[in-house]
Image (spheres, helix red, strand yellow):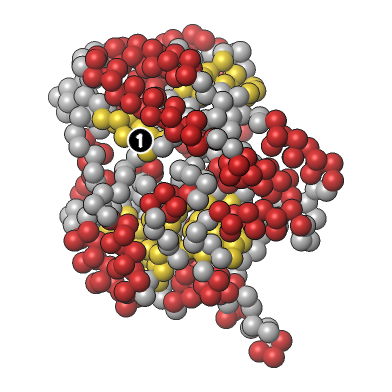
Amino acid sequence: MSLGDKQQDIDHAERLRERTPKSREFHDRAAAITPLGVESNVRAFDPYPFYVESASGSYITDIDENEYLDFLLALGPIILGHGNEEVREAVKAQVDKCDLTATPQPIAFEYMEKVAEMTPSIETVRLANSGTEATMHAMRVARSYTGKDKVAKPEGGYAGAHDYALQSVYATEEALGPADEPSTVSYGTGIPDAVSETMVAFPFNDKEATEKILRKHADDLAAVIIEPVMFSAGCLKPRDGYHEFLRELTEELGVVLIWDEVMTGFRLGPDSAQGRFGVTPDMTAFAKVAGGGYQLAGFGGRAEIMEEIIPPGKDEGHKWNSSAFHGGTYNGHPVSAAAGLKTLEILQEGDVYDHIERLGDKLFGGLQEVADDVGLPVNVQHIGSMGQVYMTDHDIHYYRDTWHANEQRFADWWLEAAGREVLFGNPMQGERFFTTYTHTDEEIDRALEVAEEAFRAVDHEYED
């Protein structure tokens, strides 16, 4: 039997299915109005998603009144717990004061000043509404600044849902080609081949191969966009000074280094991953935690690069096509900016990081211990308050190492835990989960008990 083939037919969703009859019924209604019955593809899973009614602190409650201990945390934005009172009050005050006007409001600039104050690489900044928008605009500005078309990104890396980012995210080994010089392969249909031709894939953590590829394309290469920790592949941490090496190489080649801190920004510390690792990129894209649970993202960097957004003056005849366009009706939405500003103030002034990282160590370290006790082949990787459980005991140093993980076993383990009302992220092996400020030691203890029960439920079921 091949990796992941079932040895016996066990319904790991049975417990969850029994607890969610209203969600099962609602899914029929939802699927009639939208594909898969969800607002985003990553929210769909078999047998059906459960639908949430409310959230508070460390918990979410579905329409069947099941209360789940939440480590998914909206895929990362919820760093202070659901419904933080200070953030909520800031939002209410802004709602009472002014809604969207599409004219500048001071709250957005106060927010941008705070972002620049906290982020080493950002001198000037613009706002957007999602991580996808942030990376898309950062890449466009880098292309404008350099006058070059190609952008390099690591295989297995997700940098948003726009066409240029959906390259070499997932594909077969045959399609991706050799590990030391991977092919660029679009993820999903509807993406023109011409777009893929502007993107260059390289292997994260492989210095020799990375240097060879970047030097080969240097004459046409505008930027490298990379997550400082590849959480798009679960939790793939940099090794052996990889980021220091990449910073030196891009400076030598005149290539703009963009850090995609959509996931890590303000999550791995008040000055994000770049402060934690002591490496300063040329540009940074951010989202998720930056909005405190509201739709807010942005990109920024060195002022001379960001000036590419500024159109020529009147004496040059308003040649708008000679600058990098950035716009958006909802950019700097005052309600989101109020939520984001209050969140960043709390993160900068409080003890949030000490708390969530201590509990992160306890959670992820404990998951490795209980898996070992059960005897499952498991490799738990984490940094700070975020990480992932790989269903393999193989080393996880490079993206292709993650292919050894048993995706079906992970999904079944997740379903078993969800049926016991604990959400370890979502059922996709390539995702990750988090601790938040409202989590307690008692909640982590309970999560580890549930995790062990779920590990035992999937033990000896698959060949490895």
Q: How many marks?
A: 1
Answer above or below: position of 284 versus 37.
Answer: below
Q: Nearer the viewer, residue 344 or 457?
A: 344
Q: Residue at x 59, y 37 (%)?
A: 350
Q: Residue at x 66, y 29 (%)?
A: 83
Q: Nearer the viewer, residue 257 or 122?
A: 122
Quadrant for the N terminus in the image: top left
**In this picture, residue 366 sits left or right of residue 138:** left
The percent coordinates of residue 7 (x first, y second) are 21, 16
**In this picture, residue 60 sits left or right of residue 382:** right
The percent coordinates of residue 376 (x first, y second) are 23, 20
Q: Secondary structure at mark 1?
A: strand
Q: Which residue is mark 1?
A: 382
Residue 448 seen from this side: yes
What's the amino acid at mark 1? His
Residue 194 seen from this side: no
Residue at the right extreme, as displayed: 97
When asked about the image quadrant of residue 234, the answer is top left
Answer above or below: position of 424 versus 150.
Answer: above
Q: Nearer the viewer, residue 307 or 3?
A: 307
Residue at the left extreme, as displayed: 1
The percent coordinates of residue 62 (x first, y second) are 59, 19
Circle 1 crowding by C-alpha within 10 Å: few under 14, some 14–19, many from 20 = many
Q: Residue at x 64, y 78 (%)?
A: 311
Answer above or below: position of 358 versus 13.
Answer: below
The percent coordinates of residue 414 (x first, y second) are 39, 22
Q: Nearer the viewer, residue 326 or 447?
A: 447
Quadrant for the C terminus in the image: top left
Q: Residue at x 28, y 20 (%)?
A: 369
